[in-house]
Image: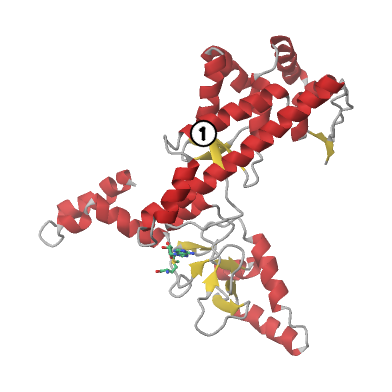
């Protein structure tokens, strides 16, 4: 953002210092203006791209419980819908929910567009219209909410400047960098780089955002398969690792290799339609690594405990918006980390139980 300001705003101020007051065009002013626009603009459809739509940005967000719904339609389509209604086939609500599913991945998706009308707007034959539809009864005087999508608190705070209590879409990210920090506390950095590159060669990667690679832990504390696979490979004995390395060089279906190693270890049948299941990767060592990662991630919050954060939130008043929402984000992330620990501890205990009873670790392989 700073680079944008330097490239686009600064030359403007230099070009007309008499008419433009430099203090109104400082980096701070630019950030504030940009935040306001970013939190009120969105991807309209393929044709219109990103933009602001008067009135469509009127409503506040509520997760999974919108009262008002926007959908972009062409006049022709609306006519067809009217005809349907006249024929007694008034399925407006079901039509809306199908739009919901399609657009759940949109950023800033207040508006849910119809693909046919996208096409007609591209051809210029049929200008689009925006429908604002009440999908719930709202009592007079109550606030009317829209939903901006299935967003966790970090995304809500980053894009819109607020958070929600008990948000079911919350996640915690664990950066690849933290995983490597854990790895380097046990092994040499050369070893870690070699294992990381092996992991990449089986066609796996984390999610990427603004040049950093990370893994998500879901709101119920479950880590992504990609993270478990990386830890598993980091902790493989050298001879198994060498075997995996060779099989990657020779096999056709790259993703099958880690599955083959797992199948051999757990004495299960592996077929090309099998999927790697998380519980196969949850060895005791991997579970211990997850617990160590939880500690490293937790240390990012500084010396204050989660209880202290909860007390601070209780004391904080809503007018201290920045403090309130940052505490809410910290607490919701740390609660997920607690569940992440429970997940790892349960995994480790189940391994110890199996080892103590000498039971086979034969486990499920998911089919496609
Ligand atoms: C599209 S606008 C919604 C209308 C908004 N109230 C306004 O003043 O323009 C998005 C902004 O509204 C605020 N907002 C929306 N939903 C909210 C919520 N549930 N809690 C707190 N603030 C919210 C945030 O500041 C967000 O950046």
In this rendering, position of residue 275 left or right of residue 163 = right
Q: Is residue 28 left or right of residue 189?
A: left
Q: Is residue 165 above or below residue 271?
A: below
**On the image, which quarter does residue 271 sit in?**
top right
Q: Nearer the viewer, residue 345 or 40?
A: 345
Element carrying mark 1 = helix
Within 10 Å of the Cα at label 1, are there few (<14), some (14-19), or many (20+) other Cα atoms? some
- Between 358 and 2, the residue placed more toward the observer is 358
Residue position marked by numbered label 1 in the rendering: 297
Establish whether ligand 1 lies closer than 8 Å to the Cβ of label 1: no
Is residue 76 in view? yes
User: For the view shown, which residue lies furthest in the top direction?
Assistant: 239
Image height check: is 57 above or below 106? below
How is the structure coloured here?
secondary structure
Residue located farthest toward the bottom when viewing the structure as drawn: 86
- Please say whether residue 176 is visible from this viewpoint: no
Reply above or below: 334 against 279.
below
Residue at image coords 54%, 13%: 190
Q: Where is residue 234 drawn, in percent x and y?
A: 64, 20
Horizontally, is 9 left or right of 339 in the view? left
Screen quadrant of the C terminus:
top right
Residue closest to the eye, 333 or 273: 333
Number of labels in the image equals 1
Question: In the image, residue 98 lies at what x, y percent?
Answer: 70, 67
Quarter containing ligand 1? bottom left
Vertical relation: 317 (above or below) 97: above
The picture places residue 36, in percent across and down from the top left corner, at 36, 61
User: Residue at 68% of width from left, 37% of height from top?
Assistant: 343
Q: What residue is drawn where x is 10% and y is 60%? A: 18
Q: Position of residue 257 (x, y in %)?
A: 76, 24
């Amino acid at each position: 953002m700073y680079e944008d300001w330097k490239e686009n705003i600064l030359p403007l101020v230099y070009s007309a210092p008499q008419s433009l007051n430099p203090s109104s065009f400082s980096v701070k002013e630019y950030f504030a203006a940009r935040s306001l626009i970013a939190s009120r603009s969105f991807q309209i459809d393929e044709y219109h791209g990103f933009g602001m739509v008067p009135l469509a940005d009127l409503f506040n967000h509520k997760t999974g419980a919108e009262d008002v719904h926007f959908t972009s339609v062409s006049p022709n389509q609306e006519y067809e819908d009217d005809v349907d209604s006249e024929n007694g086939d008034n399925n407006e609500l079901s039509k809306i929910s199908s739009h919901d599913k399609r657009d759940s991945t949109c950023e800033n998706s207040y508006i849910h567009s119809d693909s046919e009308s996208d096409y007609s707007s591209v051809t210029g034959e049929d200008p689009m219209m925006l429908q604002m539809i009440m999908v719930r009864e709202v009592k007079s005087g109550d606030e009317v909410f829209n939903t901006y999508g299935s967003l966790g608190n970090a995304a809500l705070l980053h894009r819109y400047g607020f958070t929600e209590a008990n948000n079911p879409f919350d996640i915690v990210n664990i950066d690849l960098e933290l995983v490597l920090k854990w790895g380097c506390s046990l092994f040499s950095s050369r070893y870690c780089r070699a294992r990381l590159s092996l992991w990449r060669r089986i066609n796996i990667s984390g999610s990427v955002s603004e040049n950093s690679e990370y893994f998500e832990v879901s709101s119920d504390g479950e880590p992504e398969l990609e993270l478990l696979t990386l830890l598993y490979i980091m902790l493989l004995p050298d001879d198994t690792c060498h075997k995996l390395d060779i099989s990657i060089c020779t096999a056709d279906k790259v993703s099958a290799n880690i599955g083959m190693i797992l199948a051999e270890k757990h004495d299960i049948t592996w077929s090309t339609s099998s999927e790697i299941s998380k519980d196969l990767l949850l060895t005791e060592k991997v579970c211990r690594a997850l617990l160590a990662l939880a500690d490293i991630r937790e240390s990012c919050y500084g010396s204050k405990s989660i209880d202290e954060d909860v007390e601070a939130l209780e004391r904080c008043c809503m007018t201290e918006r920045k403090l309130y929402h940052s505490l809410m984000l910290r607490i919701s992330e740390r609660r997920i980390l607690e569940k992440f620990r429970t997940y790892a501890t349960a995994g480790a205990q189940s391994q110890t139980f199996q080892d103590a009873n000498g039971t086979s670790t034969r486990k499920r392989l998911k089919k496609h």
